[in-house]
Image (cartoon, rainbow, N blue to C red):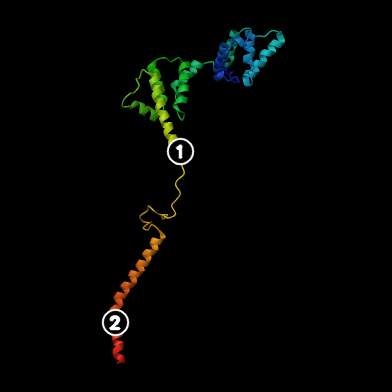
Amino acid sequence: MRPKLSCPPDFGGERHNGCTFLNSCSLYIRLAPEQFHNEEERILWALTFFKSGHAAKWSENVFHQEADTGVFPIRTWRDFEQQFRVHFFLANAEADAINALEGTSYHQGGRTVDDYLDNFQALVSDAGYTDPRMLVVKFWRGLRLGIQNQIATMPYGRPANTDPDAWYRAARRIDQARLANEAFQSVSRSAPSAPPDPHLCPWQGCPLLCPFQSLRSLRRLLCLWESLWTSTRLERQGPCLHEDVTNAETQTT
């Protein structure tokens, strides 16, 4: 049983999405040819996704031409593809890709390696770059500095400078490890802390602010200190008190 096919997304006429949309249409038609009786049905089916922007206006113009002449202006699917490329493909895709790869706008920045790699490979394809060494150099230049250094200083298994796929895999592994570590750290920081023990001093752990483990201990120490101070005072005053008592007894006799 054939799996259910997904229809192409709605198309608004953006040139940077033109190639993707046309490929989606062509793939659907190739996998389900029985759904179309002739080429005009294929074209009309594709035009049903022209729902906004420049694409919708272009579709309206096609039907206006048919109303004026009584003949549908696009005869074959090949004619449709040719006209579509003129109106909805990037005019200078190769030059734009080369300029991007010669600058810094394609660099990874804050993106994941997966997102960066998808964009990099699309640019390389448009630019027509095939030399393995050039691909490695361009890819390495665009990576974050930390990932560049980790790959360059790998103690073993460092990818060769002529193997772009190995560089792609190494960069993805490092970035995935970083993302996993960040997720772990985030969970650790958000975990609830244990409730404070009511029997412990709130300043426990500070040797200057917490010499006692509880208020009861503090009270016992204060009582002990007061007792020692009183006894010491009495010991110092003891001889004087004895002499006063002796004098008083002598005078009464």
Q: Residues within 10 Å of mark 2 (few under 14, many from 20)?
A: few
Residue 248: image quadrant is bottom left
Residue placed farthest to the front in the image? 1
Image coordinates for residue 88, horizontal then vertical, percent = 58, 16
Q: Is residue 249 left or right of residue 43?
A: left
Q: Secondary structure at mark 1?
A: helix
Residue 141: image quadrant is top left
Q: Residues within 10 Å of mark 1 (few under 14, many from 20)?
A: few
Q: Is residue 210 left or right of residue 25?
A: left
Q: What amino acid does circle 1 point to?
A: Val
Q: Indicate which disc residue 242 carries.
A: 2
Q: Is residue 192 above or below residue 46?
A: below
Q: Residue at x 55, y 19 (%)?
A: 17
Image coordinates for residue 131, horizontal then vertical, percent = 40, 15
Question: Which residue is the site of mark 1?
Answer: 187
Q: Is residue 110 above or below residue 74?
A: below
Q: Residue at x 38, y 20 (%)?
A: 166
Residue placed farthest to the bottom in the image? 253
- Can residue 89 be seen at all in this image of the molecule? no
Q: Residue at x 38, y 61 (%)?
A: 217
Residue 26: image quadrant is top right
- Can residue 124 be seen at all in this image of the molecule? yes
Front residue of this view, candidates 103 and 214: 214
Image coordinates for residue 174, horizontal then vertical, percent = 39, 28
Q: Earlier in the sequence, mark 2 or mark 1?
A: 1
Q: Secondary structure at mark 2?
A: helix
Q: What amino acid does circle 2 point to?
A: His
| Quarter of the rendering occupied by the N terminus | top right
Q: Residue at x 35, y 70 (%)?
A: 227
| Quarter of the rendering occupied by the C terminus | bottom left
